[in-house]
Every structure is written in C-alpha cells, then in structure tokens.
Amino acid sequence: MRSRGSIIGGVAAIAATFVVFVIPFLFIILMAFKDKQQSALRDFSWPNGFHLWDNLYEVVKTRNWMMITAFINSSLITVVSVTLLIVLAAMVGFVLARRKTRWNGLIEFLILAGLMIPPAVVPTIWLLQGLKLFGTLHGMILIQVAYNLPFSIILYRAFIATIPRELDEAAVIDGARPLDVFFRIILPLLWPVTVTNIVVQSVGIFNDFTNPLYYLPGNQNATVQLTLYNFQSQFSTAYNLLFTNIMLITIPPLIVFMFFNRQIVAGMTAGAVKG
Amino acid sequence: MTKTKLFALMGASTLGLMMTANAVYAQQSGYLSFLIDNGPQSVAVAEAWVAAYTEKNPDVTIDIEVRPGGGEGDNIVKTRLATGAMADVFFYNSGSLFQALNPAQNLLPLTGEAFQANVQDSFKSVVSAGGEVYGAPFAPAMGGGIFYNKPIYEELGLEIPKTWDEFMANNEKIKAAGKTAVIQTYGETWTSQVIVLADFFNVLAEDPQFAEQFTANEAKFATTPAALRSFEKLQEVHDADLFNADFGAATYPDGLRMVAMGEGAHYPMLTFGIGAIAETVPDHIQDVGFFALPGDSADKNGLTTWMPDSIYVAKTTASPDLAKDFVSFVASPEGCDIRNEAVGATGPYMIAGCELPADVPPAVSDMLPYFQEGGQNAPALEFLSPVKGPALEQITVEVGSGIRPAAEGAALYDEDVRKQAQQLGLAGW
C-alpha cells in the first residue's frame, strides 16, 4: 500500500514536469495561432481568431520558399552525417577496445582533445576553401562528423568493452573476415548505444545553428535553424511567425524522440556501466 | 543550387566579355550577391531595389542573402571578409563599427563615383578611412529623443517641452493623472542608454569642444558639468518615480507598444522605432509624436542625430563595375523613392534630391524641423569620437534603476572608456 506522502510526491513531480516541459510547448502552439498584434504581447492567452493557416503559409513561402530548401538541406545533413558518425565511431571504438597497442594512450588523448578544444572558425574556413568544400553540403557534413566524432567514439568504446571477446573469436573460427566480424557480429550488438547516438547526435545536428551560419553561407544552403532569423531581428520580431516556425521545426526531433523513446534509456545506462 | 552557380559563372564571364567589347553600353549585365541584415525594413527595401534594378537591367541577376543583426551579424561580416567569402555588396553600420572592418584592406573605395557629389559630407565622414570614402547611405538619418503619446498630451492639455524643467513638469502632471510618465525597458539593456546618448546635443551646446577633448583624454563625463547632466537627467527621472512598474523586465517592443497605445506618455528612443511601430501597431502610428531630448535652455533646443547604415562593396567582388552601378542606383533619388514606397519614410535622407512623401507619420514630421533652416542638430558622440565604452548600457541600467548615483556612474563610465581608448592606441591615454 502506498503512503499518502508518496502520492503527493508523485503528483508534485507530474505538476513540475507539466510546468517545465508542457507549458512552453503549449505557449508555442498558442502563439502560432495568433495574429501579429496579439502575439507581440507575448502573454499566455487564448488566440483571438484562428490564424494558424495564414501563419503557416506565410512562414513556408517567405523568402522564396526558403523553408522547403531548409528542410531538405537539414534532413540531408542530419541523415548523412549521423550515418557516417555511427559507422566511423563504432569502428574506432571497436579497434580501440580490442587492440591494445602503445599508441592507445595518444589516440585517446587526441579524442579527448577533440572534445575539449573549441574549433576556430576562420582557420576552418580557410581549410575548407583550400579543399574546395566551403559552402557545400558535403563540406558541412564533414564538419558535423568531425565535431561530433569524439563524443560518439567515447560512447561506443565504453560499450564495446562489455561485449565478450569470445564472440569475436568464435566468429573468426567460423571463418569470418575482420569486416564480417564488425558488421555482422559487433554492430548489431551495439544497437542500444547506436540508438543513443542517433537520438543525441541527430537532434544536436538538426538543431545546430552556429556551424551552418558560418560554414554554409548562401540562400540555397539554408538550414532550418537559420530560417528563424527570417522573423526575428535585433529591433523587431514577428512573434506569431517566429513561433509557427519554431513549431514546424520542432516536429522532426519530436518524431525521432517518440520513435526511439523506449530504447534511449536502455542505451544511456548500457554505455555507462563500464568504462 | 548548381544552376545558380553555373548562372553566376556565365554571368561573370559574359560581363567580362562585354566590358572588353563595348564599355560604353550603359546597360549592365552579370551577377551580384547582396548580403543584408534581417531587419524587416532592410529585407523589404532590398527586395524592392533589386526588383527595380533588374527590371532596368534584365541581364543582371542579384541574389539577396540575409544575415542576423547585432553581435552575431558583426561576426558573420568580419568572418566572411577575413576569408574572402563576402558577398559583392552588403549593408553594415557606419561610424565606429565600420572602422572595425579594416576598410582599406577589405572594401572597395567609392570616393570617385559620381553619386558621391549628392551625398552629404556629414555622412561621408562616418564611412571614410585613410582619405577614401567606402560607403553610400541606404537609409534616412535618425534622431535620438523622446516619443510621446499624442492623445495623452491632448487629454491633459500639455505643451511640447523645450527645457528639461518643462519636461519634468509635464511628467508630474501625467503622474498626477495616474498614468505612466516615462517608459523604460531594461529587459533589453541597450535601450537604457538613450537618455544619456540623446542628450549629447545639449552637451555640445554648453561645451562645443567636448568631443575633441574627450577623445584626447582632456575632458571627462564626471568632471564636465554639461556631460554629467546627461547622467543626472537619467537619475532624476528615476528618482521622481515616473517609470512603468515593469521597467526592469520590459523589452523594446513593449516600450514601443506602450507609447503607441497610450500605456505610457514618453519613451526615450531613436527614431528608427517608427518603422517597428508601423509594423506592429499600425492603427496607432498617428498617435505617436517625437521631440528632441530637452536641455536646460529653451534657446538651445536641438536634436542629437545618428547617421544611417551604409551599403559597401567588398574588395573581393568579381564584378566591381556592376557593384558600383548598383550602389549608385541605391543612393540616387530614384532609390529613395523606391524606399519611400517599400517601407515608408522614417526620416530625412542624406542624399541631395531625395524627397519625403507628403503623408509621413507625425513622429517623422516632428523630426524634420530640426533638420531644416533655423533648426538645430548635432551628431551623436559616437560619430565625433571613436571612444565609446562597452559597458555604458550596464552603467545606465544601474543609474536608471537607482542602484548607482549619476556622479558615480559617470566616473565609472570614464574608467570604462579608458580600456577602449588604450586598445585603439589613442594619444593621451
């Protein structure tokens, strides 16, 4: 039987979650329904009239249908760079966990350095210009992979340490080549931590603002976060359109979360058990 | 994506061919990229200019690209200039921010262009470096002063104040009538500087040498009585308890809305706010008037003015002649007319031959007498001296909130500018 105290505690926790997570979301949705004058008040009120379709249409068609280009670009960048990240990070993690050499210490230091040292914008642009990758989607993808790789490697390496080495040996005895061992034995076993990687990295890359701002100039290269600046400026902001835009671009990460929701917790704890 | 790039290449090469073949042709062709800030007025007016220009020159393609404003925008402009990835033509601030772009290295001089003959010298001085002029004005001049709500003034039978005492007397009457007399919006700290900065005409009226002496470290805000008055005025309005209750959290859009809708009587602000009022509360634009920040004497009543932003050409541009031609189109009377039509008039133009339409909002027409014969105006300190401390807005928030007395705030600001002057390597610091 549950005590009265724990019930009150549970209700309080639900109320707190509601205030912290649901109310801001409701605010976004309410704002998306308002017209410009009412939204400029920025209060938590019921919209006067239904303006969602007008706002949606306005947001999508602004600056020559920039939103659509932005969704295509962002999806491409996110999907390709997350795929590359997972394959590369899992491979590096596998090798680092399985093969002990005297270089391991140095390699791990370099990976940590990638996490700790902030990247500088101007030299990176020079490098990209030298490689003829500046202002291109594949250049942006390589940047996202490079910036996020250390974090993914660390997640994978910790998890691979928990997979018994006997599995690899059994596969080798059955005649598997090294690549088979990785792709057919190890990678499927990494599913929980892969889900964590997919969720964390895709939300991070999809929501990235500063990197596309500096490394991906040009209208045809717009990403979703940059479309926010169509409606928000230093001295004047169209809040109804801004919040409609926010609502639109919140949907894809939300879907990712709902899709992988159950596996996320498992992956988080799985990677944290042993390091 | 590739199509536009291909087009750009083709455009650039045809331009090169055309230029060698027959340079006499007035009609232009080619491709320009055009980087603008994301203010709604900038976007609307840039689109209007590009549409008009490409209609006259059908062989020209101009691609508008939008960047954020504020500190993020500064970073983008500097990054792209430093990496040679700048658009051919772009909007940016004039004055001290322009100097920070390293113009001689990054920008194309426009000194010898024909249109410069019509540009006022006061504007040229804020886009010049090392004897060359680099920019052209694309917006009207602005004034710093006080927006007031006309219905409240009519209801209480108030006169436009010419002196600070009249202004404070008006405030007392408004307060006695149970209304908010002065709106302050410290939710956005930059708005707190307006009273101090817009008072600069009055400083110069008392002490015409202040700007030079201030730059040379000979005059200080704390020890020059006329300059200290600017901080004291801010303290006085706070001490008289005239502010809106939420002055610490309200934001700039709130302030504009409040003065337009009559939730407050006065809002000290620069006149570019007119555009935002017309955008968010168009029904009340006729209710907003404007007057200069009053000084201590009615004879010396004048407006502190801000120079408009400027349009520049990057040195890395592939088609300098086309870029110059586009800039001279923007800075022509025709360009002004297009601007009037696209976003309305927000103040007098810096280009000879540019006319304002007859039906300007009252806040704009209130501003015009200061620019005409017999009217008085003077540029803000930031256009006369490169010295502007980075912490002024924090200090004015403190003074305006009653946390720090005016004299102490002025002394702290003198300390603040010292660091900046030393970084600039000015003599005497």
Image (cartoon, rainbow, N blue to C red):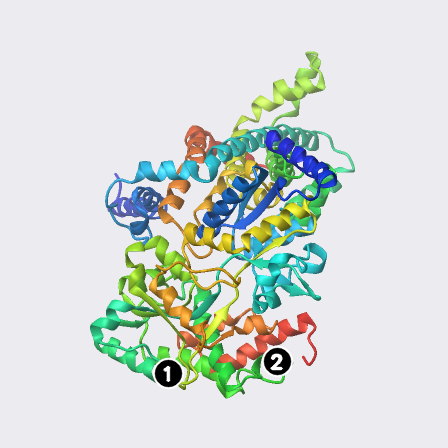
Disc 2 marks which residue? Answer: B212
Q: Give the Cα separation between the discs numbered 2 and 1.
A: 26 Å
Counting other residues with Cα less than 10 Å from the Cα at mark 2, is it few (<14), some (14-19), or many (20 or more)? Answer: few
Determine the image quadrant of residue B387. bottom right
Above or below, B305 relative to B104: below
Q: Residue at x 53, y 56 (%)?
A: B138
Q: Position of residue B397 (x, y in %)?
A: 44, 71
Split into 4 quadrants, where in the image is the N terminus of chain A? top left
The local secondary structure at tag 1 comes to loop
Q: Are marks 2 and 1 on the same chain?
A: yes
- Secondary-structure class at tag 2: helix
Residue B405 showing in the rendered view: no
The image quadrant that residue A114 belongs to is top right
Q: Quadrant of residue B400?
A: bottom left
Say left or right for A142 vs B310: right
Q: Chain of mark 2?
A: B
Q: Are marks 2 and 1 in contact (CB under 8 Å)?
A: no
Q: Earlier in the sequence, mark 2 or mark 1?
A: 1
> On the picture, is B281 further left or further right than B305?
left
Can residue B269 be spotted in the picture? Answer: yes
When the figure is inspected, residue B11 is found, relative to residue B129, above or below; the finding is above
Residue hosting label 1:
B163
Front-most of B241 and B296?
B296
Question: What residue type is disc 1 on?
Answer: Thr
From the viewer's side, name the closer residue of B188 and B283: B283
Residue B324, image x, y percentages? 63, 51
The subunit letter for the residue under badge 1 reads: B
Q: Position of residue A90 (x, y in %)?
A: 63, 29
Residue type at mark 2: give it. Glu
